[in-house]
């Protein structure tokens, strides 16, 4: 297992990039701790696969270095990096049995037969394939084959890291949940450094200790699920995490107050002067409808989504979503929306601004 350091890393698919927009990965410095379970999350085209391929050695970065522990592996081939990889679609040997597929990486390294047997049984139990160990992989469903790929990715205990690139795409929804839980369990047991690429926030938040959110070739936040929810570092994180995402309203910030459209909203802390486009961000969970306290809201739609309702309305020319807990009445007398002051985040040109006084 190893800590992975990305130093001054950047990548362009062009031979002669002419500016930042030609880079699929913008310049970055990051440390992925030894034994961490990371999810790499972001929308299509933000650079997740590019970053994963640089870590695995399938792609050489146009700039910067990759270190595994103290070792510079930037120029090392994938095979020299001692990693396991699981891809979106199954990679199995059809003519081999499930058992042989799972034990292949161990036999390849000359492991002891007794150890191989017990380890393969353990992994087979994890992926729910104990009863199929002696069947040929040929003829199994795509779902079952992908479980074999997952199992094979995890069978070695001595790898530097396990990299997963959207591994559950072909797995049915119920099994997805189960496998994710198993992966987490395996991580707790063996402490591998795991990097899991996905564009599904539920998948990321349930799997990882740390979620790495990418946007337009940059890592915009690396934090716990709670960090991403409470203090999104970038408006994209606010918007991307949560359902619905964070509300954003243009506002002028002066000290401990946000001013918008003639109204003043108290903030939970004071802020210094800032430049650029300034906005306040508030999660729908921290907005409540009132009979006159807060900002006027024009309610457009109420959606019942089971455990709560989502109220969609207009505030100061922008759309604002409010989550109302079950049982809370949504009547015509509710004409205003109030935001919990200490849950309001402030953004300047899309990046979160820390309040004065040392609070994060
Ligand atoms: N081989 C390539 N040649 C040129 N451009 C590429 C190549 N591979 C990816 N790109 C571009 O680099 C950017 C990042 O792509 P990448 O595949 O890393 O994103 P991603 O976040 O993994 O997306 P997805 O979720 O769709 O797989 C995109 O603009 C993509 O078009």
Image (cartoon, grey):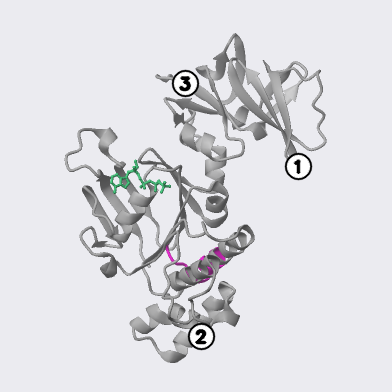
Q: Which residue shows up at 33% across the image and 50% down it?
A: 50
Asked if the beta carbon under badge 3 is closer than 8 A to the nearest atom of ligand 1, the reply is: no
* Vertical placement of residue 149 versus 354, above or below: below
Q: Who comes first in sequence, dot 3 or dot 1?
A: 3
Q: Nearer the viewer, residue 188 or 257?
A: 188
Q: Tell me the distance, in whole angstroms, between the alpha carbons under discs 3 and 1.
A: 35 Å
Q: Where is residue 246 in the image (x, y as percent from the top left)?
A: 57, 32
**Above or below for 17 versus 251:** below
* Residue 261 horizontal side relative to residue 351, left or right: right
Of the four image quadrants, the one with ligand 1 is: top left
Residue at position x 45%, y 66% in the image: 90
Q: Do the residues labelled 2 and 1 touch (CB within 8 Å)?
A: no
Whole-percent x, y for residue 61 in the image: 24, 50
Q: Is 82 left or right of 94, judged from the image as shown?
A: left
The residue wearing badge 2 is 118
Q: State which mark lies toward you, 3 or 1.
A: 1
Viewer-nearest residue: 292 or 47: 47
Mark 1: C-beta under 8 Å from nearest atom of ligand 1: no
Tell me, for residue 278, which label it has, or none: 3
Q: Say how many tags the image has.
A: 3
| Label 2 secondary element | helix
Q: Does the residue labelled 2 lie within 8 Å of ligand 1?
A: no
Q: Give the range drawn in magenta.
A: 184-193
The percent position of residue 237, horizontal first and vertical second, equals 49, 38
């Amino acid at each position: 297992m190893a800590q992975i350091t990305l130093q001054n890393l950047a990548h362009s698919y062009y031979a002669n990039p002419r500016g930042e927009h030609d880079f699929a990965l913008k310049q970055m410095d990051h440390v992925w701790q030894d034994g961490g379970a990371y999810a790499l999350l972001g929308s299509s085209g933000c650079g997740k696969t590019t970053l994963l391929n640089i870590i695995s050695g399938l792609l050489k970065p146009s700039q910067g270095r990759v270190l595994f522990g103290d070792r510079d592996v930037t120029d090392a081939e994938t095979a020299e990096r001692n990693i396991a990889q699981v891809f979106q679609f199954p990679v199995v040997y059809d003519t081999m049995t499930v058992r042989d597929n799972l034990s292949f990486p161990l036999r390849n390294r000359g492991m002891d037969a007794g150890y191989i047997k017990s380890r393969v049984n353990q992994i087979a139990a994890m992926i729910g394939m104990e009863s199929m160990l002696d069947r040929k992989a040929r003829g199994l469903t795509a779902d079952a084959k992908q479980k074999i790929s997952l199992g094979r990715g995890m069978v070695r205990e001595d790898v530097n890291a396990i990299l997963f690139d959207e591994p559950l795409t072909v797995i049915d929804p119920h099994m997805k949940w189960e496998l994710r839980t198993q992966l987490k369990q395996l991580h707790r047991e063996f402490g591998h450094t795991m990097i899991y690429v996905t564009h599904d926030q539920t998948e990321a938040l349930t799997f990882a200790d740390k979620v790495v959110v990418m946007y337009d070739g940059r890592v915009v936040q690396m934090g716990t699920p709670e960090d991403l929810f409470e203090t999104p570092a970038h408006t994209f994180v606010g918007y991307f995490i949560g359902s619905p995402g964070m509300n954003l309203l243009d506002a002028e910030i002066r000290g401990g107050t946000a001013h918008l459209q003639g109204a003043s909203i108290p903030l939970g802390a004071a802020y210094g002067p800032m430049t650029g486009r300034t906005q306040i961000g508030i999660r729908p969970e921290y907005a409540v409808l009132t009979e006159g306290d807060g900002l006027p809201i024009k309610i457009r739609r109420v959606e019942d989504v089971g455990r709560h309702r989502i109220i969609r309305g207009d505030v100061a020319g922008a759309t604002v979503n409010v989550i109302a807990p079950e049982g809370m009445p949504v009547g015509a007398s509710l004409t205003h929306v109030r935001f919990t002051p200490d849950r309001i985040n402030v953004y300047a040109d899309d990046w979160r601004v820390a309040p004065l006084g040392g609070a994060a």
